[in-house]
Image (cartoon, helix red, strand yellow):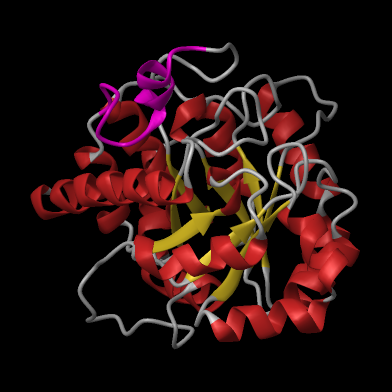
Amino acid sequence: MSNDRISRRQFHLGVAAAAVSAVAGDRNGIWAADDAFRLNYILGSPMYGTTAMGEVLGEVRKTGAEWIDIWPRRHADHREQVEAMGHERFLELLQQHNVRLGVITRYDLGPYSLQDEMRVLKKLGGRVIVTGARNAEGKTLRDQVKAFVASLAPHVAVAEELGVAIGIENHANSLIHTPDSIRYFAEFAKPPHLGIALAPYHLPQEEETIARVIKDLGPALVFFQAWQHGMGSMTKLPKEQELLQMPGRGPLDFTPLLAALKQIGYRGFTEIFMHPVPRGIPILETTEAVTAEINRARDYLERCLNRA
């Protein structure tokens, strides 16, 4: 990306960031420009496996969050639980626990089957739907990313109509997974209704590289997972090694990442996250232990933020 391009993005950063915060901001929908920077935590339902929705919602506020991100099988079954209980009952549970739906994650649907789910997201008060990329034709990586973004136009139009955002994760082995592909995506994306759901797990585990990606994304960053690679999540490991994906356990220093988020004025959700092996089980044996581990990671992130 040229220096001129970066300069133009920085010039427009304040205006675009305000628009993004209207989609994925705090309890008032938007933060004033002079508010102190903070992380807007959201709880990922897969951290609790297939624990009953009511029990998971009861943990949200305990983790310093007020939002929930619900996933379907194979990582959890909370999206299926919502359909089984009915939307009205789910809204009652949210109100009962003083929690709001922020995100629905639907990798299973892919980027071209989201329109009905975005309408459910809107109905339930959500802000962002997260999914993965698909391949596209083109002579160069930049051409392929441009073609993929163009193919999303009708879906982005629906997101704009509903006032929600589509977040494309930089998933390993997908079109959008390298720093360059993420930068190209930011070049062609149209915030606040289309952007990147950034998972540092899938990037080179180099703090400055990830921080640079965050700065280059600017307003095209619509979701951030506080998640590192550690020793991976594809094979069964002793629990202490599996937990190295969590902030403050593995070697990745999140301070430069949070400094970059602060620099771009990021107002979206931050999700403390990891994958257990096998998928679909809680990251630890009890609900209380899962919540305690998330809070340990949150304490670490807050210390990093104080240094940022």
Confirm whether the magenta stretch covers residue 18.
Answer: no
Determine the residue positioned at 42% across, 36% down. Answer: 227
Q: Residue at x 49, y 17 (%)?
A: 232
Tally of numbered tags: 0
Q: Residue at 75% across / 49% down in the picture? A: 77
Examine the image and state in which quarter residue 277 appears: top right
**Residue that extends furthest to the left in the rendered view of this protein:** 307
Note whether 208 is above or below 198 in the view shown. above
Residue 30 percent across, percent down from the top left: 44, 83
Residue 71 seen in this snapshot = yes
Instruction: Measuring from the top left, give residue 187's x and y in whole percent.
Output: 57, 46
- Where 275 sits versus 11, above or below? above
Left or right of residue 20: residue 126: right
Compare residues 152 and 112 and report the one nearer the observer: 112
Which of the two residues, 183 or 72, is positioned nearer the viewer here? 72
Is residue 266 something that shows in the picture? no
Q: Nearer the viewer, residue 236 or 13?
A: 236
**What are the residue bounds of the magenta stretch?**
237-252
